[in-house]
Image: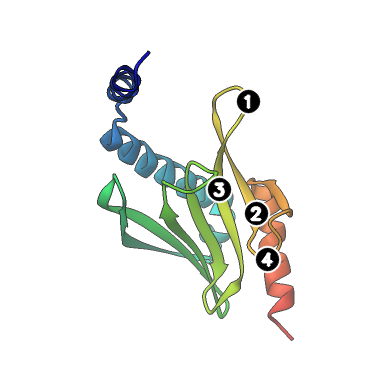
Amino acid sequence: MSLKEKLQSLNKSKNDTKIDWEKKKTDWQTEIDKTLNETKEWFQQYINSELFRVVEIEKSITEEYLGTYNVKQLEYEFGTFRLVFEPMGRNILGASGRIDIYLRGNKTDKYLLVLLETEDGTSKWFLSSFKDKTKRMEFNKTNMEKLIEDWIDQNTI
């Protein structure tokens, strides 16, 4: 096969695998909403008893291929703290999306909520320490409550 034929073959295969970026963006926005709403369900008892106050903020993100789009950022106020769930983007190296979780004013101790593909082809969220990337755990109510407890302990006298 000549170079020209090889290049034509590569170009054809590239065109055959067009990516629907609009669908990826819409799916990502839906995934963010679903995940943030799930945290509200986890913390509903704290919200109902007014131990948590929920603040929703619209955030604009600009990414290559996806353009500029809006997502929801969720924050929980409790005591003097504000726990932030800040979506960072869909096109993340090694993941299918990322949401940063941190206490406002303390981004150095943040966790990355990363959406990873599993072996069965589905996606699952994992919490990963920004300081120690080997420290990864499943994103669930128990682990999230433990993380909040640790942050409160570290940031109170």
Element assignment for label 1: loop
* Quarter of image, res 8: top left
Q: Looking at the image, tell me whether mark 1 or mark 2 is earlier in sequence order.
A: 1
- Bin the neighbour count of mark 3 within 10 Å (Cα to Cα): few under 14, some 14-19, many 20 and up: many
Residue located 55% across and 48% down the image: 114
* Distance (Cα) linking label 4 and label 1: 27 Å
Question: Rounded to the nearest whole Å, what is the CA distance between mark 1 and mark 2?
Answer: 19 Å
Looking at the picture, which amino acid does disc 4 mark? Lys
Q: Is residue 90 or residue 40 the one in the foreground? A: 90
The disc labelled 3 sits on which kind of residue?
Val
State the CA–CA distance, disc 4 to disc 3: 15 Å
Q: Is residue 76 left or right of residue 19?
A: right
The amino acid on which the numbered mark 1 sits, given as a three-letter code, is Glu
How many numbered marks does the figure carry?
A: 4
Q: Residue at x 46, y 64 (%)?
A: 75
> Pointers 2 and 3 in contact (CB under 8 A)?
yes
Q: Quadrant of the C terminus?
A: bottom right
At label 2, which amino acid type do we have?
Ser
Please name the residue that numbered disc 1 is placed on: 119
Q: Quadrant of residue 27?
A: top left
Q: Going 31% across and 17% down the picture, which residue do you hit?
A: 5
User: Residue 109: x, y in percent?
Assistant: 64, 71
Would you say the residues marked 1 and 2 are in contact, meaning their CB atoms lie under 8 Å apart? no
Residue at mark 2: 128
Label 4 SS: loop
